[in-house]
Image (cartoon, rainbow, N blue to C red):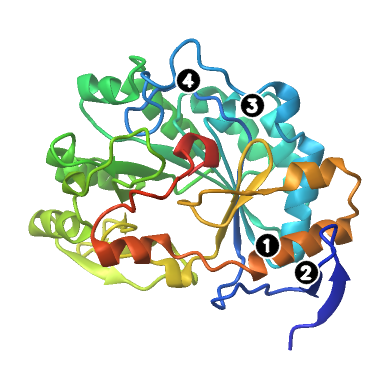
Amino acid sequence: MVEVKPAIGRSGRAHQLPSAGLRDARGRALRDLRISVTDRCNFRCVYCMPKELFGSDYQFMDRDELLSFDEIVRLASAAVALGVDKLRLTGGEPLLRRGIEELISRLAELRTPDGRKPDLALTTNGSALRVKAAALREAGLDRVTVSVDSLDETRFQAINDVRFPLARVFDGIAAATAAGLGPVKVNAVIKRGVNDDEIVPLAQHFRENGQILRFIEYMDVGASNGWALADVVPSAEIVARISAVHPLAPVAESRPGETAKRWRYLDGSGEIGVISSVTGAFCGTCTRARVSADGKLFTCLFASTGFDLRALLRSGASDTELRSELAGVWGGRDDRYSELRARIGEATPDRERIEMSYIGG
């Protein structure tokens, strides 16, 4: 039985503060916290930070607007005390945050209520991974996920829109593997008419090289990517295309609330995953919260607003008060945007959504 302790937060609300196993209004546990450490990125991917909106004159956050490492550690510690057992660092591009290894080292010292180290992961575009992989592993990072949307050099550079070479990303993946940050996972966002002709080649390439590839349906995050339902390649189609060449079989989830449905190659050569937030909404099992680089807590990737944790942290709140506010925000969570979108078959036009580059994906 979970022990429950009453607490009063800065908002004046009395919350039930569990020693572990916090649940929202739909009974979903808080297990995963994704923390954006910067809003900056050195890529201008057309589906995330297009140059038309994020040009050379774009004003990123000032340093004092970002959560400090001390604040991030306090926040992560509070979340871990409430049952979070997986921390993921995101951005922007997280490896652009100076001293990221120090932050990882401090997060690696956290322990869950039953004494375990939380799983510590990082999502990156891979541009700095070649030079940082060994130091990241030494600091205590467990795993990395790298974004690769095309195997064609010209197309890859067109997608990242800064002419960054694919070979350097592959060098970063190799360095991460050598450092023990594996098995490395690779994310590929698939958009019809852009890179859907590479579904099978992508699967084959990463299967042969020992990485776990995860295909992501093109999502309506924010308003800058010109999303349309016709551009989405359903996960079922992706699996069917691959299985026609390399037969697949479904794999049971490794933990509750996994975003990816897993499929293994029948010849034993590994697996793929598909993330179906458009055609196969998984809101009912979502265990994730996200913190923006300036300390806003979002309880859904498609949220319109966030709860200001930075203000709370900088107002002198105690650790108990911080945990209480987190418990209150999560306890009132009722988000299920993807399920609602699926009912009408398109994005809800009157709903504001936070940009992917701000919320951290």
Cα–Cα gap, marks 2 and 3: 29 Å
Q: Which label belongs to residue 97? A: 3
Secondary structure found at label 1: helix
Q: Is residue 119 visible?
A: yes
Picture layout, residue 192 above or below residue 238: above
Q: Position of residue 25 (x, y in %)?
A: 59, 75
In the rendered view, does 106 fall on the left or right side of 160? right
| Direction from residue 89 to residue 237 in the image, left or right | left
User: Which residue lies at the image location 22% right of the left edge and 69% below the top edge?
Assistant: 249
- The span from disc 3 to disc 1 (Cα, nearest Å) is 28 Å
Residue assigned mark 4: 42
Q: Is 128 above or below relative to 2? A: above
Q: Is residue 332 left or right of residue 352?
A: right
Tag 3 secondary structure: loop
Q: Which mark is residue 113?
A: 2
Q: Secondary structure at mark 4?
A: loop
Q: Nearer the viewer, mark 2 or mark 3?
A: 3
Spot the residue most to the left: 244
N-term-proximal mark, 3 vs 1: 3
| Residue in the foreground of this view, choosing between 14 and 30 | 14
Residue 135 x, y percent position in the rendering: 64, 31
Give the quarter of the figure containing the N terminus: bottom right
Q: Which residue is mark 1?
A: 329
Q: Amino acid at mark 3?
A: Arg
> For residue 164, which quarter of the picture?
top left
Measured Cα–Cα span from mark 1 to mark 2: 21 Å
